[in-house]
Image (spheres, coloured by chain):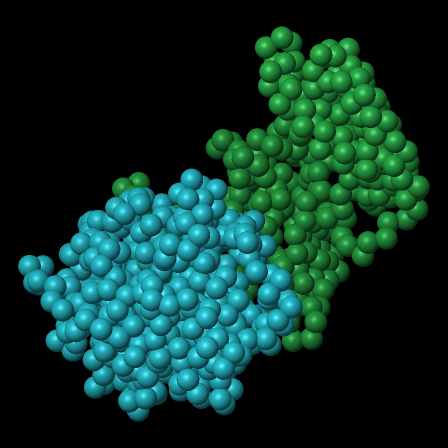
Chain colours: A cyan, B green
């Protein structure tokens, strides 16, 4: 089959690799119909996540058709499913507590040592990410082996397009859990750093969960415009001092909740970020948490900090003083997918969450490498890329008819 | 505390002594650069009973002196730097002595062990005091929580022939009788060893312990314990093994590098046992990759 494989920093290729096979009784094989490139794929593209190996198949946002099932799978051939990016057994202590992304069994014994050494406990597994998270092949491919297929995949009801439900695989539940973890109360002003797809879903979710007002922060005009379309007030950090702006816009109190939809590769030329960038490039550091530092300073006293953005290592100059003295609450973590997929599907069916307006490009899987370059280099124009293995190889990737963005 | 104060005094004495020597040297070196009165004043400051002030002032003076020494370097200056180095060295030595004394204070006494922890997590002198320690043997152990009742887990473990399902380095187990089994174990670098074990303790639902028979190629002893976890959370399963590492400590290090070290094995074997018992299968990342050497049905490490 054809699949997008990683070969090194800024080097991904569409290669021919062996087809996946059923290995365990609960497995299923999915024929991919749509797969997206995620913001967190850029951390892999930039080689910020350790333990990725040359030849690994990437991709963790995908959906498709069931083409083969193991003896204990509850899926049936021909069913259309969307697959959560985390792999969860459904039967360990964590899965039973609905902390699915903390699953104790999905990360194989051989690969779970690394994260146990690094973080104290082994991480749950995910598709198409580093070997820290299990080293499973990903979904930017024609076929994928899906373990524990009786627990993960969600069968899609008829009448819904791929684009409407594809993001149930990661970014919609991730944005929603980001807002949920902010423990939003009536009257709350919520500030969201990063207007990528997760940020955009966090904005919608925050309103859905009762936020009075959402303020979104980014520096790409088109992404800010998308945020504004969903009702957020916007801040371009190149135009304003974010801390001053947030304080002034909240009567001196500061936002009640702050959500980090940026993660480990902050943009911007703030002095701490420049230092972090140099350290990351000289292997003296791992993460660049400029946005996180800023939002802890911005958050009101007794406020809530939610971190859906991905971090992988260690940081310094972390404002622990502000965190403690202001009495902030911090919630974080990979998304407990199976907890949110069904309720969010209902929101989609009722038309309460828009899942398609920010898709900027559709392209054939064959053009995946080129699309990674665009996704990395032209973030203002490329706001979400959906890859279609079945789309004619020669097809030109076209800005989606749904939206042609005017400059903000 | 008294020790600390004494050490600090010693360190301060060292600094003051340094300053005194320094001043004397300065006096002998550059009478034409520094006036006698200045030397006297500095000596008085440096030897002042108020040590802290003396140190602070002499630091300021070092700074002032730099302009003299920039010139003096050409004719054998720089001794000041050596003295500063010596001072720092003495200070470091003092600090080292202080922490050494402190760490000796931290040593455990001769009484019984206090910690409510299993032997295999003891360290340092406590490990030497552990019950059942035998010189030359290594003790490793690991505990996992399995979300199943202990009777069920015990029953699976009691059937030694199932070990190859979840123990990576156990190739085959042949049952000889109810108590004895013949193990074929993979060793580092493709070698295999044969071990015959006998069950020496068997408490249904709670404990199984086994030891190698005298004619085995390696000496080993294992023990698995099943204990109720907090209500609703299944069972704590603890595997403890004692063995004589081939080629001693060095052999153990080699085995560790080859990932055949019993501590690593115990951890992974227990994870697989947990996975098998909770989910009915053992998680594997077997899937396609762009690496030619790999099969999509084999796990990759």
Q: Is residue B69 above or below residue A323?
A: above
In this rendered view, identify the residue nearer to me: B17 or A62. B17
Q: Is residue B196 left or right of residue A190?
A: right
Which residue occupies 67% across, 29% down?
B63
Q: Quadrant of the N terminus of chain A?
A: bottom left
Does A287 sit left or right of B143 as displayed? Answer: left
Percent coordinates x, y for residue A5 in the rendering:
26, 50
Image point (39%, 77%), residue name: A215
Rendered residue at 89%/40% (across/down): B5
Q: Residue furthest left?
A: A394
Q: Position of residue A94 (x, y in %)?
A: 55, 70
Residue A169 falls in image quadrant: bottom left
Instruction: Relative to A250, say whether A50 is above or below.
Output: above
- Could you say where residue A218 lies in the image, as x and y percent from the top left? 34, 67
Residue nearest the observer in this picture, B157 or A168 = A168
Identified at 36% across, 57% down, the residue is A268
Asked where in the image residue A162 lies, by quadrant, the reply is bottom left
Is A85 left or right of B80, judged from the image as shown?
left
Farthest top residue in view: B75
Q: Quadrant of residue A151?
A: bottom left
Q: Is residue B100 visible?
A: no
Counting every numbered tag in the picture gives 0
Where does residue A290 sit, x and y in percent of width and height? 45, 58
Work out whether residue B203 can be spotted: yes
Q: Give left or right: position of B245 versus B100.
A: left
Q: Quadrant of the C terminus of chain A?
A: bottom left
């Amino acid at each position: 089959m054809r699949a997008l494989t990683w070969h090194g920093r800024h080097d991904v290729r569409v290669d021919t690799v062996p087809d996946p096979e059923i290995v365990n009784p609960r497995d299923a094989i999915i024929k991919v119909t749509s797969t997206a490139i995620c913001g967190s794929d850029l951390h892999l593209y930039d080689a910020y996540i350790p333990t990725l190996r040359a030849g690994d198949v990437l991709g963790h946002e995908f959906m498709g058709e069931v083409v083969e099932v193991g003896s204990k799978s509850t899926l049936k051939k021909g069913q259309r499913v969307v697959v959560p990016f985390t792999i969860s057994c459904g039967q360990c202590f964590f899965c039973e507590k609905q902390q699915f992304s903390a699953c104790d069994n999905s990360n194989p014994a051989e690969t779970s040592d690394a994260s146990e050494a690094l973080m104290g406990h082994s991480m749950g597994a995910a598709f198409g990410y580093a070997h820290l998270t299990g080293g499973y092949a990903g979904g930017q491919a024609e076929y994928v082996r899906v373990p524990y297929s009786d627990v993960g995949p969600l069968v899609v009801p008829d009448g819904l397009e791929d684009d409407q439900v594809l993001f149930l695989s990661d970014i919609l539940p991730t944005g929603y859990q980001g807002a949920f973890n902010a423990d939003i109360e009536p009257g709350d002003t919520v500030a969201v750093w990063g207007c990528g797809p997760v940020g955009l879903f966090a904005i919608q979710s925050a309103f859905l969960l009762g936020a009075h007002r959402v303020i979104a922060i980014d520096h790409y005009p088109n992404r800010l415009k998308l945020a504004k379309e969903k009702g957020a007030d916007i801040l371009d950090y190149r135009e304003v001092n974010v801390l001053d702006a947030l304080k002034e816009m909240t009567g001196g109190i500061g936002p009640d909740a702050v959500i980090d939809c940026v993660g480990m590769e902050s943009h911007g030329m703030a002095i701490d970020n420049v230092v972090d960038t140099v350290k990351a490039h000289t292997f003296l550091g791992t993460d660049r948490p400029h946005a996180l530092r800023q939002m802890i300073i911005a958050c009101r006293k007794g406020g809530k900090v939610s971190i859906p953005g991905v971090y992988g290592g260690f940081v310094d100059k972390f404002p622990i003083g502000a965190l403690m003295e202001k009495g902030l609450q911090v919630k974080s973590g990979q998304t407990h997918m199976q907890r949110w997929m069904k309720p969010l599907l209902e929101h989609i069916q009722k038309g309460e969450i828009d899942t398609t307006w920010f898709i900027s490009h559709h392209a054939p899987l064959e053009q995946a490498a080129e699309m990674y370059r665009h996704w990395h280099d032209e973030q203002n124009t490329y706001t979400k890329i959906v890859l279609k293995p079945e789309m004619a190889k020669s097809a030109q990737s076209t800005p989606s008819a749904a939206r042609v963005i005017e400059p903000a | 505390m008294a020790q600390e104060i004494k050490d600090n005094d010693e360190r301060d004495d060292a600094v003051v002594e340094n300053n005194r020597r320094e001043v004397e040297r300065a006096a002998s070196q550059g009478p034409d650069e520094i006036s006698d009165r200045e030397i006297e004043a500095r000596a008085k400051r440096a030897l002042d009973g108020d040590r802290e002030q003396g140190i602070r002032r002499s630091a300021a003076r070092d700074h002032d002196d730099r302009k003299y020494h920039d010139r003096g370097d050409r004719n054998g200056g720089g001794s000041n730097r050596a003295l500063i180095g010596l001072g720092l060295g003495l200070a470091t030595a003092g600090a080292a002595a202080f922490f050494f004394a402190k760490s000796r204070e931290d040593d455990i006494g001769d009484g019984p062990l206090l910690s409510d922890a299993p032997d295999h997590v003891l360290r340092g002198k406590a490990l030497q005091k552990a019950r059942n320690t035998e010189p030359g043997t290594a003790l490793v152990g690991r505990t996992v929580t399995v979300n199943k009742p202990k009777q069920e887990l015990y029953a699976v473990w009691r059937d030694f022939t199932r070990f190859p399902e979840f123990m990576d380095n156990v190739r085959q187990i042949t049952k000889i009788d109810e108590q004895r089994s013949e193990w074929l174990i993979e060793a580092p670098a493709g070698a295999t060893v044969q071990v015959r074990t006998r069950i020496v303790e068997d408490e249904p639902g709670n404990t199984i312990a086994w030891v190698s028979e005298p004619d085995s190629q390696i000496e080993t002893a294992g023990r698995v314990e099943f204990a109720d976890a907090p209500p609703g959370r299944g069972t704590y399963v603890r595997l403890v093994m004692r063995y004589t590492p081939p080629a001693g400590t060095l052999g153990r290090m080699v085995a560790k590098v080859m990932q055949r070290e019993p501590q690593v094995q115990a951890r992974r074997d227990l994870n697989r046992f947990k996975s098998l018992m909770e989910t009915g299968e053992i998680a594997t990342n077997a899937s396609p990759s762009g690496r030619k050497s790999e099969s999509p049905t084999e796990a990759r490490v």
